[in-house]
Image (cartoon, helix red, strand yellow):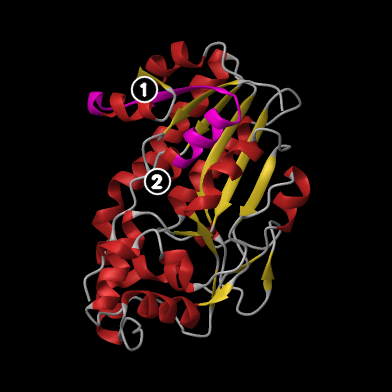
């Protein structure tokens, strides 16, 4: 692919760091919007150029986007561990998916950027039991998933004959990240790490495969794409955590915790047997980690003390 200029927001998070490295390695010119000055050194280490900007202010983004071929938004603020069961813990993430995405899309439009790539999540799909999920499968919008739908709608409205809007619905991220480390520590201490029904399906994506997916999205037609490895039963993931952490067996969240968490928990329990065939056929992307096994936790397992 010809080298292009890409401006990334959310470039210092788990997904962002992987994407920036992959974009730079692919030969693209990469600028990263730095919300905090302390991120400038990290951005430089990744091989990109830091540009100060405010994700919630289109006027600060327009000058950064002028001359760019693509804008990639990966900004999230996902709560770690059991905090994800609390509604108030998602407030910043919800603002990033609503106000920030609208600002980014508005700025891209004014600056004349031809392509916007937006991170999304598989939890927006309705529970499909054992049925396969494609991009045409129904989604289920609740108060909890509405911010995801808002972000997706903004990017879909951006698409037209002269502009591309690409949405990447990632599976649950596992690997070299803070969330995985939290659940490994919990498993080592005998605490529950499973959410939902043991025989339901979940779709995962390893941190090794995130960056390549973003690079592939630069050549994708407008649309929604599922991105993940082969789906796996939740019981297999929970036992994988236990094995990697040196525990006898894995545990699922009990009924009391499920009741206390309220509606925030429901999307995390949906059975999602998600297919990524459309993305692979459209872009040539293939996961380096196509099938889940306990080795997925190797990059994070060194922090666990049984």
Crowding near the residue tagged with mark 1, few <14, some 14–19, many ≥20 C-alpha atoms within 10 Å: some
Find residue 66 and name its label: none
Q: Is residue 182 above or below residue 213?
A: below
Residue 28 is one of the magenta-drawn residues: yes
Give how far apart the Cα atoms at labels 1 and 2 are: 24 Å
Residue under label 1, please give it: 57
Query: Toward which corner of the image does residue 282 lie, by quadrant?
Result: top right
Q: Is residue 9 left or right of residue 109?
A: left
Whichever of callouts 1 and 2 sits on the residue coming sooner in the sequence is: 2
Q: Is residue 291 left or right of residue 106?
A: right
Find residue 14 and name its label: 2
Residues 154 and 237: in front is 237
At numbered mark 1, what does the secondary structure look like: helix, strand or loop? loop
Residue at (50% x, 61% y) in the render: 123
Crowding near the residue tagged with mark 2, few <14, some 14–19, many ≥20 C-alpha atoms within 10 Å: many
Q: Is residue 101 above or below residue 255?
A: above
Q: Position of residue 56 (x, y in %)?
A: 35, 28
Image quarter of the C terminus? bottom left
Query: Toward which corner of the image does residue 76 lie, by quadrant?
Result: top left
Q: Position of residue 287 (x, y in %)?
A: 63, 55
- Asked if labels 2 and 1 touch by Cβ distance under 8 angstroms, the answer is no
Query: Toward which corner of the image does residue 87 lie, by quadrant?
Result: bottom left
Residue 199 is one of the magenta-drawn residues: no
Tell me if residue 224 can be seen.
yes
Residues 270 and 277: in front is 277
Q: Which residues are magenta?
A: 18-38
Residue at (24% x, 75% y) in the render: 260
At numbered mark 2, what does the secondary structure look like: helix, strand or loop? helix
Q: Position of residue 62 (x, y in %)?
A: 46, 14
Q: Position of residue 129 (x, y in %)?
A: 60, 79
Q: Is residue 296 above or below residue 221?
A: below
Image quarter of the N terminus? top right
């Amino acid at each position: 692919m010809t080298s292009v200029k890409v401006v990334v927001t959310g470039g210092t998070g788990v997904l962002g760091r992987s994407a920036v490295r992959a974009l730079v390695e692919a030969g693209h010119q990469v600028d990263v919007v730095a919300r905090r000055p302390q991120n400038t050194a990290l951005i430089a280490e990744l091989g990109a150029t830091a540009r100060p900007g405010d994700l919630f202010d289109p006027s600060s983004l327009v000058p950064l986007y002028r001359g760019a071929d693509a804008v990639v938004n990966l900004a999230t603020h996902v709560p770690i561990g059991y905090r994800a069961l609390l509604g108030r813990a998602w407030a910043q993430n919800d603002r990033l998916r609503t106000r920030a995405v609208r600002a980014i899309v508005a700025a891209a439009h004014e600056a004349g950027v031809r392509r916007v790539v937006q991170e999304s999540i598989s939890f927006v799909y309705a529970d499909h039991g054992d049925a396969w999920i494609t991009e045409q499968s129904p989604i289920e919008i609740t108060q909890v998933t509405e911010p995801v739908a808002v972000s997706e709608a903004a990017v879909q409205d951006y698409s037209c004959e002269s502009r591309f809007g690409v949405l990447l619905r990632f599976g649950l991220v596992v690997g070299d990240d803070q969330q995985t480390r939290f659940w490994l520590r919990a498993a080592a201490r005998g605490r529950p790490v499973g959410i939902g029904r043991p025989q339901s399906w979940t779709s995962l994506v390893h941190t090794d495969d995130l960056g390549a997916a973003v690079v592939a999205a630069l050549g994708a037609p407008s649309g929604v794409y599922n991105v993940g490895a082969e789906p796996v039963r939740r019981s297999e993931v929970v036992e994988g955590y236990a094995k990697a952490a040196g525990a006898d067996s894995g545990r699922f969240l009990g009924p009391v915790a499920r009741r206390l968490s309220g509606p925030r928990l429901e999307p995390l329990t949906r059975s999602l047997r998600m297919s990524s065939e459309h993305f692979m056929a459209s872009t040539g992307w293939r996961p380096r980690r196509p099938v889940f096994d306990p080795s997925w936790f190797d990059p994070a397992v060194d922090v666990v003390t049984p």
